[in-house]
Image (spheres, helix red, strand yellow):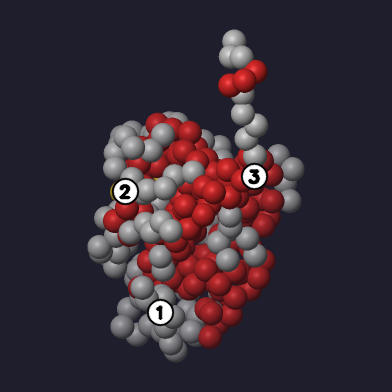
Amino acid sequence: MASCSTLKIVDSNAAMNAGAAAVQALTISDAQVAELCSQYMVETDGQNTILPADNSYTQRLNRIMARFHNISNLNLNYKVYQSSTVNAFASGDGSIRIYSGLMDVMNDDELFAVIGHELGHLINKDVRDAYRNAYLIVAARYGIAAVNTTAGAISTGFLGDLGQELANNAFSRKQEYEADAASFQFCVQNGVDPYAMYHALNRLMGLSGDSSMKGRLAELLQTHPYTEKRAARIKEMCEAAGYSMTAPKTNSTGSGNTNTVSPKTNGGSNNSGTGTKPKKTVSTKKG
């Protein structure tokens, strides 16, 4: 045991403030953020059960993702986590992760729209900024004075704290609305029901009233708030673009759902009855 003369009383607040001051001078580049995201995904994938390529959930996700035609330069990779949790998320390295619990409660159009929403967060740099901010906050706790995101340089504990910080900080109302606009645009451009995100949000709101579902929905609703207002805005967006609503396709729970919507013809109609040629389009945010 150390003698009393060697003990020092440390002011933890002062130490934290000193660490924060050092971190304020840090800058983290987009390339470093991407590397940070990549390391975080290695850790996260290792903590979850990833369904194999021959699994019916993965095959269904592959069918859905094959319909995206305007997602170049995002370096996407997508996998299904086996979990009853109803959630999906995107990482700044292009990783898209869908929980099988989400696939169980949504049809293909709705899943397409939800994935489009997550891609919207990537395109609009929301995910990049969230990781950057989370890194700087956690770095302040650790008193890190220099950024090093190379493989192996970030501890498991740091990555765990990073994940907690990400989970605790929801996207802003503006970011959610812009990602919804991106989802709408993806649906329009790829022949999917323009109301798919509207139906997906209403499905989530309906499930949130089921006491048995609250735990499974908690993270999704925490990180993606304003659900009712978002649904109303998407409906307005569709109506302004000249689309009329049809009922969502019957959701056959599980991995076997293969609902599809044919692309619009030049005349503006499609065989699903989801509306006429839009009067205007909604563009995703640049940069």
Residue occupying the point 61% across, 29% down: 8
The earlier-in-sequence mark between 2 and 1 is 2
Question: Hey, which residue is sitting farthest front in the picture?
Answer: 5
Residue drawn 43% across and 33% down? 156
Residue 99 shows up from this direction: no
Residue 127: image x %, image y %?
Answer: 44, 58
Of circles 3 and 2, the one toward us is: 3
Q: Residues within 10 Å of mark 3 (few under 14, many from 20)?
A: few
Q: Nearer the viewer, residue 88 or 169?
A: 169
Secondary structure beneath label 2: helix
Alpha carbon separation for disc pair 2 and 1: 29 Å
Residue indicated by mark 3: 13
Horizontal relation, residue 184 to residue 235: left or right: left
Q: CA distance from mark 3 to mark 1?
A: 46 Å
User: Alpha-carbon neighbours of circle 2 within 10 Å: few (<14), some, or many (≥20)?
Assistant: some
**Image height check: is 64 above or below 176?**
above
Give x and y (percent) for residue 284. Answer: 41, 75
Dot 3 or dot 1: first in sequence order is 3
Indicate which disc, 3 or 2, sits on the residue closer to the N terminus: 3
Q: Nearer the viewer, residue 69 or 104?
A: 69
- Amino acid found under the numbered disc labelled 1: Ser
Examine the rendering and report whether any part of residue 53 can be seen.
yes
Q: Amino acid at mark 2?
A: Glu
Question: Which of the 4 image quarters holds residue 56?
Answer: top left
Task: Name the residue beneath numbered marker 2.
Answer: 35
Query: SS of the residue at dot 3?
Result: helix
Secondary structure under tag 1 reads: loop
Q: 287 above or below 281?
A: above
Q: CA distance from mark 3 to mark 2?
A: 31 Å
Label 1 environment density (alpha carbons within 10 Å; few <14, some 14–19, many ≥20): few
Q: Nearer the viewer, mark 2 or mark 1?
A: 2
Q: On the image, numbered disc 1 is attached to which residue?
A: 283
